[in-house]
Image (cartoon, rainbow, N blue to C red):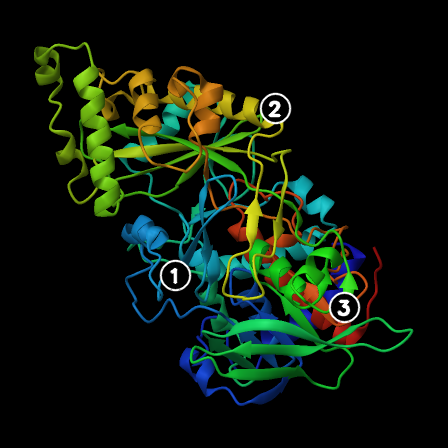
Amino acid sequence: MGLELWMFLPLVYVSLFHFHGFSLAEKAPYYSFVHEAAVAPEVSFFDYIIVGGGTAGCPLAATLSERASVLILERGGSPYESPGKPDKGNFFPNMLDNTPGSYSQEFTSEDGVSNTRARVLGGGSVINAGFYSHAEPQFLIQAGLNEGLVNYSYRWVEKKVAFRPPMLQWQSALRDGMLEAGVLPNNGFTFDHIYGTKVGGTIFDGDDHRHSAADLLEYGNPFKIKVYLHATVEKILFETKVFSKPRAQGVVFEDELGKKHWALLTKDLKSEVILSAGAIGSPQLLMLSGIGPSQQLKKFGIKVVMDHSMVGQSLVDNPLNVLLVPSPNPVELSLVSFAAITKFGSYIEGCSGISFTPAWSRSIARALASILNKTEQSSTKLFQEGMPRPESLLDTRIRGGIIFEKVKDPKSTGYLELRSTNPHDTPKVIFNYFQAPEDLMKCVKGMRTVIDAIYSTSFSNFRYEILSAQALLDLIVMLPLNERPRHIASSLSLEKFCMDTVMTIWHYHGGCRMGKVVDYDYKVYGVDALRVVDGSTFTSSPGTNPQSTVMMLGRYMGLKILQERYFGKHRKK
């Protein structure tokens, strides 16, 4: 245990044993501190104002509430209003639901790739595929995080939301297929990020119920924390004085009825505004508040508080490509249970038995029917394999699975620009997928590994022999996965296939990068009383799936901020 962690022990002791009478096993009375923004007073005061009640914001707020007054402003609603809605079987319907009260807000990047922003208490942990796996050690080193406090913070999260997933038929067959394809060794079950194939954690319990970052609010002090839902922050308020840095004073937010409210910081100089609105929302709010590229701000008539050219820059999305594999045998409902972590920079995962929207089911059935009509196999062969009508493979739940490949640490970067001054509007976003040739090579190698696993002996019970690898590639090319132009015969080249059928895995990050926009304490350069604590600060997406690290970071930085507030800053980096 290093010197730095020893400095935290008094605070950790207080939080664990003297926290307002609640033990770790007890739940804070949730509805005592969560309200609609419409009931908020016109003006209120808090030690910490957190913009975004998402994957980082909830654990951050719960931790800060142990010793200070905290406000969370969340633009979406509560995941607890419809208890079964976030559960495993509703993954794709929730992700594709873009109605006003939904958990997600759809947008399309300038690259022509459909994407989603979470808008619900708990953030992306309410709508994702649930895989729980730690960051690689190199990520933690680059971020300057203390290993002891990181591990303590992970365990704090895991007591509430992490479980061991069941490994049933389809997931087990695909895992074994990955081992046959050479993604070795078999690392068994672990949260750790290790080369090879491993079973990771999940935030779905044994009954397929989801446990999100919002559950971490159960750790919060109900007498010190306030959460307002459907609260859209319009801008951060700053005090500006000659010869002094601008200082955050609070925020202006709008409730669902359009009424404005002012949340202000208490007079304590340690009080802060903290942005946890994600890789789209945090840089967007900085710009709307006057911190960003001055030329862009002036274009929209925004008063420049600080000219900061790197806000909104170095935005990255990890490219995703998939194959859909119909199965001759029944498959279980499963989301991501294991990950194949290659040494060439590709992560491979899969899900089975999932439900689509009716429109998507029809699109897949039409594409599959077209593939079968073009096959040179005789009707006798189709009969021998028991190939049913394509529509029956998609009756309620797909009889088959989706196997997907994610490019690790893409070199291609993009940027974010304001589209308007309306905080409800998603900014203009471009990721420049596969602009760097090495990213494309990772995808090609990853897709070859996926194909090898599909046609392995281990996976033979869950594929039709009459559907060749070329047929599976043709099937994906025929689907309306994105709005990008298609090359001629794009399924005949894996390079063209990767470029033409690229999608998102929703792990986009950057826009407020550490070392560019924030320092190693997540404080915005050139401004006082303002931090950003979320994935917008990341230089890469941690591990195979980032949610565990984002939740850990909320807890970690909550402890760091309280330590600084009550014991003083002891380290400079």
Q: Residues within 10 Å of mark 3 (few under 14, many from 20)?
A: many
Q: Residues within 10 Å of mark 1 (few under 14, many from 20)?
A: many
- Residue that numbered label 2 is attached to: 437
Residue at 72% over, 44% down: 141
Name the mark nearer the viewer: 2 or 1: 2
Indicate the secondary structure of the residue bearing disc 1: loop
Q: Position of residue 187 (x, y in %)?
A: 49, 32
Name the mark nearer the viewer: 2 or 3: 3
Seen from the viewer's position, the closer of residues 519 and 339 is: 519
Q: Look at the picture and state if 483 lies above or below 24.
A: above
- Alpha carbon of mark 2 to alpha carbon of mark 3: how far? 39 Å
- Alpha carbon of mark 2 to alpha carbon of mark 1: how far? 35 Å
Indicate the secondary structure of the residue bearing disc 2: helix
Residue 362 located left or right of residue 22: left
The quadrant holding residue 125 is bottom left
Three-letter code for the amino acid on which mark 3 is drawn:
Val
Do the numbered discs 2 and 1 sit on residues whose CB atoms are within 8 Å?
A: no
- Residue that numbered label 1 is attached to: 103
Residue at 91% over, 73% down: 243
Q: Position of residue 364 (x, y in %)?
A: 24, 34
Residue 293 seen from this side: no
Three-letter code for the amino acid on which mark 1 is drawn:
Tyr
Specify which label sits upstream in the sequence, 2 or 3: 3
Q: Position of residue 295 (x, y in %)?
A: 73, 56
What is the number of the mark on residue 305? 3
Three-letter code for the amino acid on which mark 2 is drawn:
Pro
- Alpha carbon of mark 1 to alpha carbon of mark 3: how far? 33 Å
Q: Look at the picture and state if 427 lies above or below 40.
A: above
Specify which label sits upstream in the sequence, 2 or 1: 1
Q: Look at the picture and state if 205 lies above or below 478.
A: below
Residue 247 located left or right of residue 512: right
Q: Position of residue 14 (x, y in %)?
A: 65, 75
